[in-house]
Image (cartoon, rainbow, N blue to C red):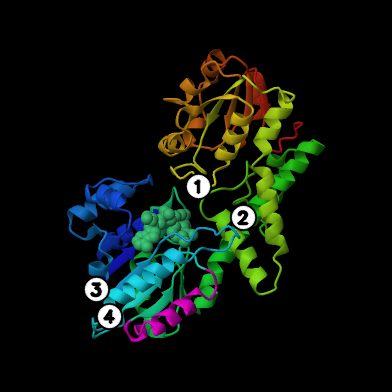
């Protein structure tokens, strides 16, 4: 199939590349000239494991193209994916201005072009958008006199940054929201190569598909805030959340997944989507009390590492040197949007702490924000040189088994604040570190 994907961020670029990999002819569009120039040179503007090889191969084989020319791209396409950002407004709702500017541009480009004779041209909304957006887009196309040219389908994306290729290639499920079954059939054919292991292709109304995406992220965010709150209580009461998690996880109604305590969830999705659910509820007079609590717990949790550090040093932080390992909002990505590391960095800089930071992939993004206010360490050991304390904020695999003898030797003080519970308290004590985890039964 001939496909245009508009928006070449984490979702659009992965979508376009994976669809090219399964044999489609794909053109990816973005209005960021620099991004497109980088992609045209066969490089990536983002870090995502495995993506570079796929982009280069499909480019070389002529199935994947990059352009800023939306009009030319969509005129040739049978399927037009919209994967632009939907960031939060100051009130917490989803900002749909990029989505609607794309809808208008697509309508403009298709005016005068006849629909393909065999099947309808489909505008596929992959961006996460509030319930009712599909209907609003259809109404907008009607207003522009283009409704007969385009079907509008909702096809929320569930990929995880850091495992995006795997998630797209082998999705747990594909959800499509359509008004006409023929539209679902075109999408079923498109996704067939990715669903060969009997993963379900779920067809529903656009409203249900839109809501499904928010419900999924709301549930995942709830699990994180739940376990974080339990961990905080463990800290106060002397219980160990690690054991508690084992104790509850074997109950099959609960399970183990996504129940890891930490310094709060970040990223471009959970905070914004929880906010959007609250905003949707507000608009229709349906207070989303649980989501409000999930959001409030998360805001507080993003302060947890600072609170532990401040308590350990009795508020006397000025002049200390602290090493931070992990800056991205989670491992295997360079994305720092809403990352807990940024909240910690801000708080420590305010207290005049010297920071030596290291991350395997996100350094360039953090440097763009903080310039020479931080020391950007070449590797984890460079970061701990002369440090009073080490803080683990993101659980990159390379931080799991470091050379503790060397760390002890390099550090000035011997305190570790482990925001991801990747080390064992007893082992840390054996190495001679004062160790703080999250919910490991140690005082705040
Ligand atoms: P992103 O910010 O990485 O990418 C968005 C891209 O759209 C950018 O490259 C931007 O330049 C481009 N863009 C914006 N306006 C444009 C326009 N008018 N014309 C052409 N290009 C335009 O965003 P993302 O993380 O890929 O997310 C995209 C959507 O997918 C969001 O709605 C998000 O909620 C959703 N989503 C994201 C993830 C994720 O893990 N990142 C997962 C599932 C769903």
What label does residue 337 carry, if any?
1
* Residue identifier under label 2: 221
Residue range (magenta)? 130-149
Please report whichever mark, 1 or 3, sits nearer to the chain's N-terminal start.
3
What secondary structure is marked by label 2?
A: helix
Is residue 324 positioned above or below 120 on the image?
A: above
Count neighbours of disc 2 (C-alpha within 10 A) and say few if under 14, some if 14 to 19, many if 20 or more.
many
Residue 202 is situated, as x and y percent measured from the top left of the image, at 48, 74
Give the residue at the far right of this rendering: 237
Q: Is residue 150 above or below residue 171?
A: below
User: Is residue 80 found left or right of 292 in the rendered image?
Assistant: left
Q: Secondary structure at mark 3?
A: helix
Label 1 residue SS: loop
Q: Which residue is mark 4?
A: 111
Q: Earlier in the sequence, mark 2 or mark 1?
A: 2
Say whether marks 1 and 4 touch (CB < 8 Å): no
Q: Nearer the viewer, mark 1 or mark 4?
A: 4
Which residue shows up at 59% across the image and 52% down it? 257
The alpha-carbon separation of the residues under discs 2 and 1 comes to 16 Å
In magenta stretch: residue 144: yes
Label 4 to label 2, Cα distance in Å? 42 Å
Query: Of marks 3 and 4, which one's residue comes earlier in the chain?
Result: 3
Residue for badge 3 = 75
For marks 4 and 2, the one nearer the N-term is 4
Quarter assignment of residue 386: top right
Residue 296 appears left or right of 97: right
Q: Earlier in the sequence, mark 1 or mark 4?
A: 4
> Taking 379 as reference, is 313 left or right?
right
Residue 370, x across and y down, in percent: 48, 34
């Amino acid at each position: 199939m001939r496909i245009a994907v508009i928006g070449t961020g984490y979702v659009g670029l992965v979508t376009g590349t994976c669809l090219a990999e399964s044999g489609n002819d794909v053109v990816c569009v973005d209005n960021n000239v620099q991004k497109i120039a980088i992609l045209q040179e066969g490089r990536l503007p983002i870090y995502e494991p495995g993506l570079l090889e796929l982009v280069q191969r499909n480019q070389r084989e002529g199935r994947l193209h990059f352009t800023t020319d939306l009009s030319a791209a969509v005129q040739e396409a049978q399927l037009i994916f919209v994967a632009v950002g939907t960031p939060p407004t100051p009130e917490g709702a989803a900002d749909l201005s990029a989505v609607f500017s794309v809808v208008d541009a697509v309508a403009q480009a298709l005016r005068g072009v006849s629909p393909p004779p065999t099947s309808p041209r489909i505008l596929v909304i992959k961006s996460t958008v509030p319930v009712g957006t599909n209907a609003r887009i259809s109404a907008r196309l009607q207003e522009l006199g283009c409704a007969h040219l385009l079907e509008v389908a909702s096809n929320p994306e569930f990929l995880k940054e850091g495992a995006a290729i795997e998630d797209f290639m082998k999705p747990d499920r594909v959800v499509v929201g359509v008004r006409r079954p023929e539209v679902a059939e075109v999408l079923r054919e498109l996704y067939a190569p990715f669903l060969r292991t009997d993963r379900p292709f779920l067809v529903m109304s656009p409203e249900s598909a839109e809501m499904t995406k928010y419900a999924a992220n709301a549930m995942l965010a709830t699990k994180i805030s739940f376990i974080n709150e339990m961990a905080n209580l463990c800290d106060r009461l002397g219980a160990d959340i690690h054991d508690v998690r084992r104790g509850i996880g074997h109950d099959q109604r609960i399970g183990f997944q996504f129940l890891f305590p930490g310094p709060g969830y970040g990223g471009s999705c959970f905070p914004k989507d929880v906010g959007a659910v609250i905003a949707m509820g507000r608009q229709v007079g349906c207070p989303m009390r649980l989501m409000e609590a999930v959001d409030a717990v998360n805001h507080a949790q993003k302060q947890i590492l600072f609170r532990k550090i401040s308590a350990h040093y009795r508020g006397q932080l000025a002049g200390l040197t602290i090493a931070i390992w992990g800056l991205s909002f989670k491992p295997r990505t360079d994305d720092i949007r809403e990352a807990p590391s940024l909240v910690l960095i801000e708080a420590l800089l305010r207290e005049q702490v010297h920071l030596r930071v290291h991350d395997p992939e996100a350094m360039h993004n953090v440097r763009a924000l903080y310039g020479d206010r931080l020391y950007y360490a070449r590797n984890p050991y460079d970061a701990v040189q002369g440090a009073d304390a080490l803080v683990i904020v993101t659980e990159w695999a390379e931080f799991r088994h470091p050379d503790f003898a060397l760390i002890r030797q390099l550090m000035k003080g011997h305190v570790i604040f482990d925001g991801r519970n990747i080390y064992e308290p007893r082992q840390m004590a054996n190495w001679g570190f004062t160790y703080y985890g999250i919910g490991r039964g140690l005082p705040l």
